[in-house]
Every structure is written in C-alpha cells, then in structure tokens.
Image (tube, coloured by chain):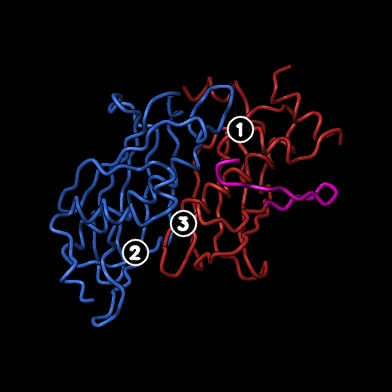
Amino acid sequence: MAPSNTAAHTRLELCRRFVATVQHSTNLGIEVLETGEDSVRCRMPWRAELVGNPETGAIHGGAVFAFLDQVGGLANACAIYPDYEITPTIDFRLDHLRPAESGRAVIGDGVCYRLSSQVAFVRVTAFAEGLEEEPVATGLATYMRMKIPRGSDREAPRE
Amino acid sequence: MNELARRVTQCRSGEAAYQDLVDHVPYARFLGIQVEAHGEEMTFVLPKNADNLGNPTLPALHGGAVAGFLEQSAIIYLLLKMGEPRVPKTIDFTVDYLRAGYFRDTFAECRVTRLGRRVANLAIDAWQVRRSEPIAIARSHFLLSEEAEDQLS
C-alpha cells in the first residue's frame, strides 16, 4: 500500500496513530496533546505502577525517560511530516531536576531543533501538570533518520 | 527502620532473595525485571515481553523500556552495594543505543566507576546474545546522601 493513500491528514493525527502502534507507549498511557511544525506536547498520567520510590509515590526516572524518548520521536515525526520515517534513538541524556510529584501527570515537550539529512537533534523538557515553571527533567537526544524506501510495504502507522 | 531499609538489610544478610527488593518497586514490576545473583555478582534480566515493544514491525524493544530497565538495575545495584540503604536519586542518565534490541531476553550488568560520599557514577551495559555485543550502554550519576541534597537545594 502506498504511504500517500494512508498518510495522516495532520501532524496531531499522525502522532496519535504513531503512539497507538507502540505497545510500550500505550502501556505508559501516553497521550498526544498538541503538535507544531517541529514540536509536540504529550501527557503521561500518574499511575501507581509507574512509581519508583514507594515511600514518596514519585514516578520512576526510567518511566520519565521512556516517555520523553517517545516524545522526541514524535517531535521528529512532526519535523519530517508529511513524509514518514522511523527514527531510532542514537543517544539520549536526561537530567533529573526534581522528583515528579506523586499523583500529578507529567507533561513532556519535545522540539526537533535541527533536522539534518541523516540525523535529528532533539530537546525535551518535562514538568508536573500545572507546574510548568518547575521542570522535573530536561534532556537532549539524537535520532537516526531511516528513510522508508518507495514501494516498500512499510507505511505510516495506522490504528 | 523503614520497609525499604529492612528489605535491603535482609537481602544483604542472605535472609531474603534480591528479587524481593526488585518486587518492592512498582515500576520494576511494570517492566517485569528479574535479578539473578551469583554470589555478590548480579545480572539483571528484562524477560522477553510484548509489553516492552516499541517497533511492532521489526519487532524491536522500546528504547525507553531498555533505559528504564538499566536505570532500575543501577538503583537496585547501588542499594545493595552502598552503606546506608536509601533510594539513590538519579541526577542524570545517558544511554547510547548501539544495536536494535530484538524481541528476546535482555541482560544488564552494572559497574560502579566511582562511589563517592555524595555522588556515585555507574556504567551499565545491556546485551542480548553476548556481552561483547551490547545493545545499549549507559552511564549515570546518582545522589546518595541527604546532606548532598541539602547542599544542592
């Protein structure tokens, strides 16, 4: 099936379809809130099973990492839109500035600030919902662009 | 003594299996992390599980799930190695993804590069087929003590 026949009509739609195909991201409960030309904002609800420190109820740093890795991939999808490519992570560094407060969802912003022919460069920030001025984590990542050859049976993800 | 400290003490003395400590952390259960102890050496295992997939067509593991596995492994490792049993706080975590993680069991081993009074530096390797072909390598800094936290805030 040609990608053009199944292409998402908007970046938001593309990102939502993308997340729906990624089992682990679905399990994390990731929702896509907004998209821009090269950016995305997502939400990961607080859930007891994502807790890292049972004494404080704070979400595990690893869960925040997995969330933001997905946010970065979606920022790439926005920058590459209307084309669609898969972008495996080359490296990802996350700084944990403060704990993610128990009971609050985490909001993640991603920006693909440079898209070269081979590599996508991304910045990510996360904060507890309602506390945008106090980020819980900031990160930098690079992703490899893997162009999907024409005529391939791979296509933009569908639900 | 709190619940965590009690479990760590029991693990160290051999009264409890290391797995008891892993199972105390909700996120570790979410990923399905197992720990194998060989004397004082530890290998962490992320068993093959469709819940941790990222790319459905390959299929390949979600890079974030691998990172979460490595971070949790490092925290458990530190809890069992350091003096005062207190959850170390991740300062930063960096992962280099070297190969695709395929749909199979993944293993991890941790090395303490430096264990300071306030900060620990760890290197964590993940592999699937052989140690010499890691799928991802991570390094990380952890904050260990209360005083350190006071000084940073």
Q: What is chain A's hue in the picture? A: blue
Tell me: A117 left or right of B10: left
Nearest the eye: A48 or A53: A48
Tell me: B109 left or right of B94: right
Residue at (24, 83) in percent of width and height = A151
Tell me: B8 left or right of A87: right
Residue at (20, 76) in percent of width and height = A2
Please give the range of residues in magenta.
B29-44
Q: Which residue is mark 3?
A: B62
Q: Which residue is mark 2?
A: A87
Determine crowd level at label 1: few under 14, some 14-19, many 20+ residues with C-alpha closer than 10 A: many
The disc numbered 1 marks a residue on which chain? Answer: B
Residue B42 to residue B26: above or below:
below
Q: Which residue is mark 1?
A: B88
Q: At which x and y percent is residue A133?
A: 28, 26
Q: What is chain B's hue in the picture? A: red
